[in-house]
Image (cartoon, rainbow, N blue to C red):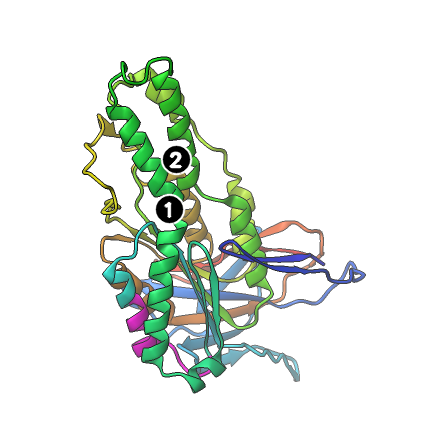
Amino acid sequence: MKKHTIILAILVLGLTPFAQEIQHEAVAVNIEVPTRVFKGKTFIDNLTIDDFEIYEDGVLQTVEAVYLIRKTEIKRKEIKSEGAIDIEFSPDPSRTFVFMFEIIEYLPKIGEVLDYFFESVIRPGDSLIIATPTKTYNLNSQALERVSKEEIAKQLKGKLRADANLGSSEYRSQLRYTKTMDELDPAVVAGIDKKYTLLNALRHLQQLAYFDEKRATDFADFLKAKQGQKHVFFFFQKRTIPIPKEFTDIDEMEFLHDISLDSNKLKHAFADSSISCHFLYITKTFIDTDAKRPLPLTRKVTKRMESAMQSFRGFAEIAEVTGGLIDSSANAAASFERAVDYSENYYLLYYAPKNYKADGKFKDIKVNVKGQKYRITHRSGYVAD
């Protein structure tokens, strides 16, 4: 068994060791595959168990059961009969919503996300986790019984605003320092290698904008242990890296080096956790309104660094392998509504892998609808452990 390290934002909740269990060569398991089927933008809700095909590592499997889910309700189910014995399944349509905010400034449209969620989305029995740049807030179903939705939304917006300002303070400070240093006359900074100083400042700024791989995999491990359906909405605000006026193309190439990212590790961790992860990229660029004076823009902002592309690629890939939505807009509230609408209708497919072995390897899953060319999204696989 795995050890689960629960880490959200910068809050470490602890390590929970589990006793190891003996694994046998032949183990009966049922794999659950949340699946969405679209024709254009329309969800197809009339499919039956005989319409689906599931392949594991290229080998056709037997679909044992199919459930059609709308929000938290099971609308229809089909269970394949094996002789005189019905195979029973226990799908859990309860929902855990997770909002992860990697933002530099609080925007009014982000506040509208919380308003819409509490007005139109959350239902009794749902739970909510919000990870801000500095803290994590866990709202269970009992909290809604004690405090009104409007009051909870108001309190969370206040906390998110404060946490965003606190969490981005180092980025803001480093950005101001870089711009100020770039504008200084070389004579004023005599004895200081201005280009070397700027290069180090930019590298630090680059690190602040990049994707934290360990945090992401730990987070996936935490979600795997939670019951029910898990919907993650990752809000990532566009970040800019200014390039100094005096930098040549060669200087720029030296600075803009790639940070390695283990894409397979990310894909395996998030697909295995059976979540639906939606990547919502906020394209509105941060404007430093706290600066004491307007700082002129530097020579250029490279397209390669405009969106902290390594972070964009990392989380976009997570959305893809979990069957989630990728959306890009200056309007965070509109992106969120699209993602919610996308996530609320789905099928739960079950199959028992042929010749299953707990070998710790990642098993690729592919779902088809027979004779159709629908757009199908689902998690890309699981780890046989």
Image point (46%, 52%), residue name: 321
The quadrant of the rendering that contains the N terminus is: bottom right
Q: Quadrant of residue 277?
A: bottom left
Q: Which mark is residue 205?
A: 2
Query: What's under tag 1, amino acid-wise?
Result: Ser
Q: Is residue 96 visible?
A: yes
Whether residue 272 is in magenta: the answer is no
SS assignment for the magenta stretch, majority = helix
Instruction: Locate residue 351 relative to residue 70 in the image: left or right.
Output: right
Instruction: Locate residue 80 relative to residue 292 in the image: left or right.
Output: right
Report how far apart the C-alphas of labels 1 and 2 lie in the structure: 12 Å
Crowding near pointer 2: few (<14 within 10 Å), some, many (20+)?
many
Q: Is residue 45 visible?
A: no
Q: Which mark is residue 169?
A: 1
Q: Quadrant of residue 71?
A: bottom left
> Magenta segment range?
113-125
For marks 1 and 2 on the same chain, the one whose residue lies earlier in the sequence: 1
Furthest-bottom residue in this view: 145
- The answer to whether 262 is drawn above or below residue 236 in the figure is above
Image point (34%, 78%), residue name: 151
Image point (39%, 41%), residue name: 209
Kindly state the secondary structure of the residue where label 1 is placed.
Answer: helix
